[in-house]
Amino acid sequence: MCASLDEFCEAIVESEFMETRPCRRRWTEEEKAILRRWHGHITDEEIGEILGRSEIGVMMYWKRELHLPAPMTDPAYISGRKIAELLGADSHQSPMWIDRGIMPGEYLPRRDNRLHRRVLWSDFIEWIKNPENWVWFHIEKVKDEGLREIIREAQKEWADEWWTTRQVADFHHVTPKDVLRYIGLGRIKARHVVNISGRDRGRWAYWFVLRSEATRKELVFIHNRKRIL
């Protein structure tokens, strides 16, 4: 008797595979290349339709013969949920980054209606190193020491940082409303980040200003015709 439900199901698949084995045609190099190309990007059923093979036959071949990793455990990728965990971000944020194209990623092929997102590790590291992406998460909350070191090195090279409107206001001894007014007037270049929480599309939006922009000598706040020093 099988020790688990998974072993029982695999035994059934194996029996079906063995029963059809005498009728199987040999896999060509072209078919193997197609299977490697699309494995993890479309379902085994869809690959089978392309090759004229059964879903079970495709699954058994990549697993037993090609020794390819299962899409959910492929070490070349990191899941959307794991990304949020490593960055200390809300679990709603990383899926939103992928959905909106903020972070390069893809959806795992699933027969159910659930969406499983993943990102190539190499793409994730490049995304982390880009200062343009640091507005989407709190650097100080990043949990993984390796990622923190990557960010620290990128910060040294960049030699700038993103400030909130509150930080800009504190530097100039004004209020955040004054900063927002100047942004609206085009006197301060700023970046508008919409739905930063990943929960409510379009509801939460924040402005970020580069420190180099906020501290330039030419930037002077005037209120009621008086210069604010």
Image (cartoon, helix red, strand yellow):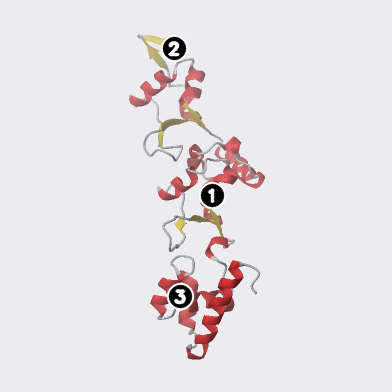
Answer with left or right where residue 44 lies relative to residue 140. Answer: left
Q: What's under tag 3, amino acid-wise?
A: Glu
**Who's the residue at 48% across and 55% down the image?**
116
The residue labelled by disc 1 is 81
The residue labelled by disc 2 is 228
| Secondary-structure class at tag 3 | helix
Measured Cα–Cα span from mark 3 to mark 1: 28 Å
The residue labelled by disc 3 is 55
Answer with left or right where residue 190 lies relative to residue 75. Answer: left
Q: Residue 215, percent across and down?
A: 49, 24
Question: Along the line of sight, which residue is nearer the eye, 204 or 124?
Answer: 204
Q: Mark 3 or mark 2, which is nearer the start of the sequence?
A: 3
| Secondary-structure class at tag 2 | strand
**In this view of the protein, can residue 216 be seen by the observer?**
no
**In this view of the protein, can residue 145 be seen by the observer?**
yes
Considering every residue shown, the one lying at the far bottom of the view is 22
Q: Residue 197, percent across and down?
A: 46, 37
Answer with left or right where residue 211 lies relative to residue 192. Answer: right
